Amino acid sequence: MKRILYTLIILLLFNHTSVDSQNLPIWLTHDEKIILNEEYFSSREDQISSVEFTAPPSSAVRTMAEWEEIQALVITWTSYPTVLREIVKHAKLECEVIIICSNENTVRNYLSSYGIDDTNITFLERPYDSIWMRDYGGNTVYTNDIDSLILIDWIYNRPRPNDDVLPQTIAEHFDIPLYSTTVAPSDLVHTGGNFMADGLGIAFSSNLVLEENEPGNPYGVTTKTEEDIDQIMNDFMGIDEYIKMPVLPYDGIHHIDMHMKLLDEETLLIGEYPQGVADGPQIEANLQYVLNNFNSSFGTPFKIRRIQMPPDNGLYPNNWLADYRTYTNSVFVNKTILVPIYEEQFDTTALRIMEEELPGYKVIGIDCNSIIQSGGALHCITRAVGVSDPLLIVHQALEDREQDNNDYFIEATIQHKSGIQTASVFYTTDLNLGYQSVPMSFTNNNTWTALIPNQASGSVIHYYIHAEANSGKTMNRPMPAPEGYWKFKINGLTSTFEIQNEGVKLQMNEIFPNPSNSITCIPIHTNKNLKQVSIELFDVYGKLINTIHQGEMSVGDNNFFIFANKYASGTYFVRLKYNEGITSRKLIIK
């Protein structure tokens, strides 16, 4: 009864037609701010449906990463039909598309008029308030990594009651449990555009999640400390490391999907402005905070890839006449990634970057000039539902390495609830000649290993992992393989251990002591002051163990030190890199 009462209050205050309500921006409207108070949100305990669980799951849980396999993409058919049409056109080739709509025939006929049939499309006629499915849709979570599919629903930070219950619709449609953070002490306000997970227990958000749950919040939730929020996210979603960053000055909604995206477990795609412009300084400060305080789930520094935040008629968001254009607000749909585009002179570079970072994926640009005016793009209006039986392959891609005449060690975690029957690594040094395969061996704890045979210096090795479950299900990683792949290069060592380039001479002298089991000196000489010199420690398998130095180097002799007793005994390589030049020396740790 309370839900009905407050819905009527909202409709009266809005004084909008149903069409107007469908055009709600991603931010709070003036009328919504009026009703954003504890009275509206205090009714939520009476709104719990029969399909919801308000206590956390009893089993260990894992939040799905966005690049994992999905069975459906969900959208709400409201305004911006040209954008929605293009999403449906491409997504239905990869998975089922669920369309929440008010009239199935109207949408079906519209799509048909553009040559899009209803194959792989399901229409659900339900009430709704807005298009911003990312923010109010449920999160895909698995019990025990890969066992059972469930959805997790937070308290939506908008007084939009029809949107707020759509996760129940999706849970009922797929007949899967829905867990919600709606009842104290686990009541939590959160929004999907401000959340990104790596699939292995690390997640990112802006400090908006802290602000919306702090004392005096208008949502009626009990006050939450950061530790409280971390515990709820761990209990419901399996988040072990929850990284939060200051909000940006000009991104009015403070959602991280407007300026960053996880491309895989260790690669962050970061939106970049011209130096000193708009949110650029705060984005860079946040990034440096992350890099200085956190590692990827592999225990190594995050890799950073940058992509332009394109201007709007030459203006950026620090000028309030400009839209907040972004390419990071893109969405994975199995072997396709949908990318917002705006203006060809900028789009061409952005799409090329996506293709380089995600080889084998279909990179599809969709014009978002209309919808970006309301504060969001493609990621903001879509929600994925993961498959019910994921075959999970986790692997840290090999880095470029120096020739040492050893084979190349491949390790992956591979899981399916029926167990894994076989796994293989496919590799080639020439994509035109096709792949060869080597079988992987099970070791322990879902770990599988293999060796790619040693290749000549200068070779570029492309590879992917294929696995088959006992149930017969198969999966590749990267998912678009064999068109998609990881790659690494075999560099030949120079006899002089130096880099010479355009008048720069950078030399790594003998490391001492070597072998070592204590403090170890790495002497470097340069004839010029240099910027962006890196010194890194790799193990014999090419895995980055430590970044010893990253940044400037003064003319003359420079000594850098590591404590060898911090590392396991074995063979390592110290790599010196400047621009395109690379050289290495071997280090033995006893």
Image (cartoon, rainbow, N blue to C red):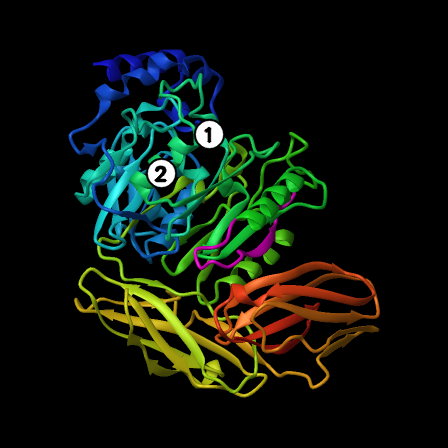
Position of residue 134 measured from the top left corner of the image (x, y, whole percent): 39, 39
Q: Main secondary structure of the magenta part?
A: loop
Dot 1 alpha-carbon crowd within 10 angstroms: few under 14, some 14 to 19, many 20 or more:
some
Residue 558 in view: yes
Residue labelled with disc 1: 210
Dot 2 alpha-carbon crowd within 10 angstroms: few under 14, some 14 to 19, many 20 or more:
many
> Identity of the amino acid at label 2?
Met
Residue 312 in view: no
Report the front residue among 393 and 162.
Answer: 393
For the magenta stretch, what is the residue range?
294-312
Image position of 192 with respect to 65: above or below: above
Helix, strand or loop at mark 1: helix
Helix, strand or loop at mark 2: helix
Report the front residue among 391 and 120.
Answer: 391
Quarter-wise, where is residue 446 in the image?
bottom left
Residue labelled with disc 2: 233
Q: Residue at x 32, y 71 (%)?
A: 448
Image position of 117 with respect to 516: above or below: above
Please tell me which of labels 2 and 1 falls first in the chain.
1
Tags 2 and 1 in contact by the CB under 8 Å rule?
A: no
Instruction: Say left or right for 317 vs 369.
Output: right
Position of residue 357 measured from the top left corner of the image (x, y, whole percent): 52, 62
> Identity of the amino acid at label 1?
Leu
Quarter-wise, where is residue 326 in the image?
top right
Q: Is residue 74 magenta?
A: no
CA–CA distance in space, label 2 to label 1:
12 Å
Q: Is residue 298 magenta?
A: yes
